[in-house]
Amino acid sequence: MIGRVRTALLAALLVIGLTAPALAQKPVKIGVLTPLSPPGDAAAGQFIVRGAKMGAEDVNARGGVLGGRKIELVVEDDAGTPEKGGAGFRKLASQDQAVAVVGQFHSSVMTAVQALAEQFKVPVFSTQASARQITEKHLNYTFRTHVIDPDRCQMWTRWVKERGFKRAALITENTDYGVGLVDETKKAFASMYPGAELKTIIFDRAVVDLTPQLLEIKNWKPDVLLNGGIGTPMYLIIKQAYDVGLHPAVPMLISYDAPARPEYWKTLGEKGTWASFIVYYHPTMKLTARGEAFRKKYMADFKEDPIYGALNAYSQVVLLADALNAAKSDNSDELVKALLAGKFEGWNGTISFSRGEGPYWQQWTPPMLVTQYTKPEMPFADVKIVYPTELKTGDWMAVPKR
């Protein structure tokens, strides 16, 4: 009997000895849920994945997390739709057992996914989804390191006012993002620029011909056109506004930073000239040591300037690594506590998450800048920052009279 007990004990010790190191080295999985196919902005998703992979490589090269465990990314395509986003998140949370999910780009997808994050108790990060309601719901497992639409709309209202434009037309899509832009811009104009006129048009994101809407806007005779499309619709607005003679005769401001991507000129050619657009990163910006290291490696690897989506996804992955180490655990509740308690090195400053009022909940906001293309095929690094005044590197230019 004693012999059997001794044999069983030795066998158990042997099993523990064999499995403990294996368990210690089990990778920590982080999900990347982002648009990689239509109708989502697939180019945006590709840059987000690129940055997230660089973040995981950086963390792993420095020894991983939690005493030597590697970060392993699991990538899922949400296709820019809430249905696919929900299915992808369920897989990441249950089957893959991801400790957190980054990469959210479309606000409508993020809104659907964040409800599942509460259910599964898995933190989800907005990388570029900006609708107010995302952080206004005050959910425990939702975090964002991107701008909020009320701030975006107030900023472009100030820009319109500074330029002296009295009649502004906003054309945008029937998504959470687009509807939010209309609501927030109406509020901003009412409170900040009551003497100005604002015309808004919302279209179905699946539409391929916006000529009637753009002709309606042209006949209204606006001083400025606000382009609220995302991905393909954004390009469609520019092309067809050019074709009907609306742009560049009427200045256009694009609501986000897609024109900074190399695809912009390939898609539009000379039709993309004279567009102004909002960005959150510019090559002239001074970055943190972590941000500068990323920029240097990105340029060495890809022979082009970084894109903000890649920079932000990279920052979110390394931030999560820092939080995991601070928590000394991959338990989701401990991770959330560490995220709320800590201060983390971001790409251009210190990132921290507080629980403020309204949408300022578990939210960190990057800079917002207006830039302008003034020549065909103009490299993004050559564009001037034309707003806000304190960060200007050049003046906004009106289209020369022919």
Image (cartoon, rainbow, N blue to C red):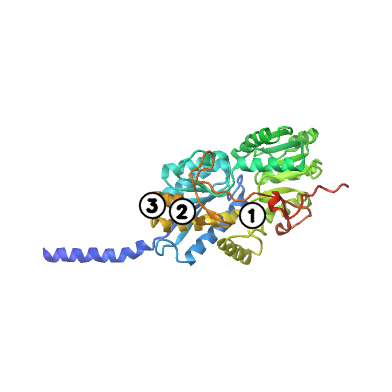
- When the figure is inspected, residue 156 is found, relative to residue 263, above or below; the finding is above
Quadrant for the N terminus, please. Answer: bottom left
Residue appearing at x 66%, y 65% in the figure: 303
- Determine contact: label 3, label 1, CB under 8 Å: no
* Mark 3 vs mark 1: in front: 1
Residue type, numbered disc 3: Asn
Q: Residues within 10 Å of mark 1 (few under 14, many from 20)?
A: many
Per the model, the C-alpha gap separating discs 2 and 3 is: 16 Å
Residue appearing at x 42%, y 60% in the figure: 27
Question: In the image, 180: left or right of 24?
Answer: right
Q: Earlier in the sequence, mark 3 or mark 1?
A: 1
Q: Is residue 7 visible?
A: yes
Q: Which mark is residue 331?
A: 3
Q: Which mark is residue 342?
A: 2
* Mark 1 vs mark 2: in front: 2
Q: 72 or 114, which is in the foreground?
A: 114
Q: Residues within 10 Å of mark 3 (few under 14, many from 20)?
A: few
In x, y percent, where is residue 236?
Answer: 71, 44
Instruction: Determine the image quadrant of residue 120.
Output: top left
The residue that mark 1 highlights is 281
Question: In the image, 181: left or right of 317?
Answer: right
Question: In the image, 257: left or right of 81?
Answer: right
Q: Residues within 10 Å of mark 2 (few under 14, many from 20)?
A: some
Residue type, numbered disc 2: Gly
Per the model, the C-alpha gap separating discs 1 and 2 is: 24 Å
Q: Is residue 46 visible?
A: no
Residue appearing at x 19%, y 64% in the figure: 9
In x, y percent, where is residue 345?
Answer: 52, 58
- Per the image, label 3 sits on a secondary structure element best described as loop
Residue type, numbered disc 1: Tyr
Q: Earlier in the sequence, mark 1 or mark 2?
A: 1
